[in-house]
Image: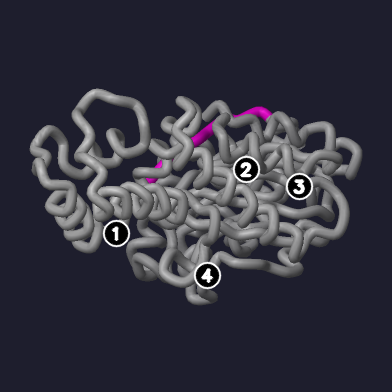
Amino acid sequence: MTESLVVGVDAGATSTRVAVHALDGARVGYARAGAGNPTAHGLGKAVSAIAAALGEALGTLDGARVVGSLAGVAGKVEEMVPALAEVWAGHGIAEGPRYMGDVAIAYAAGSAEPDGSMLLSGTGAVAARIVGFELDRIADGLGWLLGDEGSGFWIGRQGVKAVVAALDRGVPVPPAGGGVLAELVVGHFLGDERPAAPRAAADRIVRLAQADHMRLAAVSALVSRAATAGDPAAIEVTKEAAGHLVATLRRVHESGPVVLAGSVLTSEGPVRAAVEELLAGVSVTTAGDAAGAAAWLAARDLLPEAEARALHPAFTAADA
């Protein structure tokens, strides 16, 4: 059994990760590739990304040693099942991976308890109730246009809205080099070429945001930076974001741990701090490596429960 291997896949909208572990938790292979979401990027591109990461992660390892595998895929479509089985067979792996959505994988990256909840805020935002490491209920995750309240995109948009509204009221265009929200947002969009007239600066920012709405998501980090520096508008946005996120979580959470996932909540910052304050008294943990979590779930089917629990930190350590 010590020579046996398990494979975990975390395939998302921006990147794909594959982890290969021995059953004692030792990580023996790890690789990253491009986006693996078949809904967003098409079946062919998603399968190619997973195949590339699997091949690199296995390296010279014998695929015949793989005794279990699990693929957590954002934008899950059933056509992936035979496609991934073919990829696995090409590496000499006897069976294709067990296939599931990525939400339960994100939860398992932070807890060995089978029942609990997950709150994620990255580019998007979603909360989920997990029962037996399977998705039971979900809240929000409705996308940047109509939902994802408290997400990185939402935070960035609210920050830019506050700055544009101030410029529209005639607040002077800030100079370069400062650390408050208006200075950071204007610099992000306009650099050093700033119109003297506030309304002209506002109009240019609006046009740039409309041309590439994902530029708003990048402002999330600037809002956190400004809030940390004490900017009142930024502090208000981060507190409002935390309120939305916790309200979404409370729609699904019943008992057990709450796992925080996504870049907004797994890194130290004002949003995470505000969320933790609102969740005082709740057992809160942070998600580790999701590909390792998928490998752990595959290994969990093969190990005694107590041993699997003990090995959870080794599989999910976020050091890859």
Mark 1 vs 2, N-terminal side: 2
Between the residue at mark 1 and the residue at mark 2, the CA separation in whole angstroms equals: 46 Å
**Label 1 sits on residue:** 213
Mark 4 vs 3, N-terminal side: 4
Return the mark for residue 91. none
- Is 42 on the left or on the right of 111, as rendered? left
* Residue type at numbered disc 4: Leu
Residue 154 picture location, percent across and down: 45, 55
Between the residue at mark 1 and the residue at mark 4, the CA separation in whole angstroms equals: 16 Å
Q: Of residues 240 and 253, which is closer to you in this image?
A: 240
- Badge 4 crowding class, 10 Å Cα cut-off, few under 14, some 14 to 19, many 20 or more, is few
Q: Element at badge 1?
A: loop
Q: In terms of secondary structure, what is the magenta stretch mainly?
A: strand
Q: Residue pushed farthest front?
A: 170
Residue 302 picture location, percent across and down: 80, 48
Which residue is located at x 56 percent, y 26 percent? 319
**Label 3 sits on residue:** 258
* Residue type at numbered disc 1: His
**Label 4 sits on residue:** 142
Mark 2 vs 3, N-terminal side: 2
First to last magenta residue range: 26-33
**Compared with residue 233, is residue 225 higher up or lower down, i.e. above or below?**
above
**Label 2 sits on residue:** 65
Mark 1 vs 4, N-terminal side: 4
Residue 99 picture location, percent across and down: 61, 64
Quarter holding residue 283: top right
Q: Of residues 45 and 275, which is closer to you in this image?
A: 275
Q: Are marks 2 and 3 in contact (CB under 8 Å)?
A: no
